Amino acid sequence: MAVISTCSAVPADDFSIDRSPQGEDNLIDGTVAREWGDFIRAKDIRINCRTVRSVVRNVPRPEDYFTKCDLKTEFDHPYAAFTDEQLEQIANHDWEAAYLLAYRLLMQPSPEKKRDENPQTGLSYAMNALVNTGEPQIFELMIKGRHFNNWIVWATVNGVPNERQIGEKSEEYLWYKVGRNLGYIENDDHQWRRLTGIMKRFESYFDIDELNSQAARISDGVAKRRSMITGE
């Protein structure tokens, strides 16, 4: 089974970010930053490229500047031109439509819809598509669609992390563990190793056994539904 790569940053807004030192890679609007996807092919297109100064000095240096672009994802699929309403009409039996609709709800919500109003619907479409196809690309969307905060430094008071961080890291660990159980995430995955390191460091604040039990119930449920569909 193919595994997903989870090392790339999760977009903070509707677009992710592409950056490099000024003059490198000739970053300009409309160029392709990367192509990806085995289930449905996609391209990340550079838009809104601009020069940004990272360090303020009395006498600027060339290395103080870099080029920064936003990235907009475009899917190479006939359904990409469908409206949300058209996708909704077929998403309960067409898993490519379900994936594309889930992606929009989770990663590219329309201006009148706030992202936090859509995750459960988007994740439901994604879960149905995952159960019926087993595609790693769909599970990757389920991870990114939860918009976990990848804190570099934890905020602690007297060495104690705050409850919000504990809750979010517990949920993140839960879903990465589901991915491990299903074979989508390898043991040496960067974010998985980072999560287990956090859990070990603050182990007294996490119920690892309970999180592992929850993950087992979810992954067993997915595997059972897959087995009923495929007969394997």
Image (spheres, grey):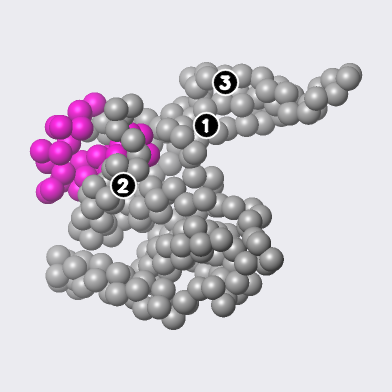
Mark 3 to mark 2: distance in Å? Answer: 29 Å
Residue 59 sits in quarter: top right
Question: Which residues are drawn in magenta?
Answer: 81-109
Q: Residue at x 49, y 58 (%)?
A: 164
What residue would you read off at disc 2?
Answer: 119
Who's the residue at 50% across and 35% down the image? Answer: 16
- Residues at discs 2 and 1 in contact (Cβ within 8 Å): no
In the foreground, 218 or 137:
218
Q: Which residue is mark 1?
A: 33
x and y percentages locating residue 218 in the rendered image: 30, 69
Pointer 3 residue: 49
Q: Is residue 86 magenta?
A: yes
The amino acid type found where label 3 is placed reads Cys
Callout 2: helix, strand or loop?
A: helix
36 w.r.t. 132: above or below: above
Q: Taking 178 as reference, is 8 above or below it?
A: above
What main secondary structure does the magenta stretch of the protein show?
helix
Give above or below for 39 relative to 181: above
Name the outermost residue toward the bottom.
Answer: 209
Q: Nearer the viewer, mark 1 or mark 3?
A: 3
Q: Amino acid at mark 1?
A: Ala
Q: Please give left or right for residue 51 compared with residue 118 in the image.
A: right
Question: Per the image, is 168 magenta?
Answer: no
Across and down, in percent, residue 22 comes to 71, 24
Residue 183: name its quadrant: bottom left
> Which image quarter is the N terminus in?
bottom left
Q: Earlier in the sequence, mark 1 or mark 3?
A: 1
Give percent across and percent down for residue 37: 39, 44
Report helix, strand or loop for mark 1: strand
Mark 3, Cα crowd under 10 Å, few <14 / some 14-19 / many 20+, is some
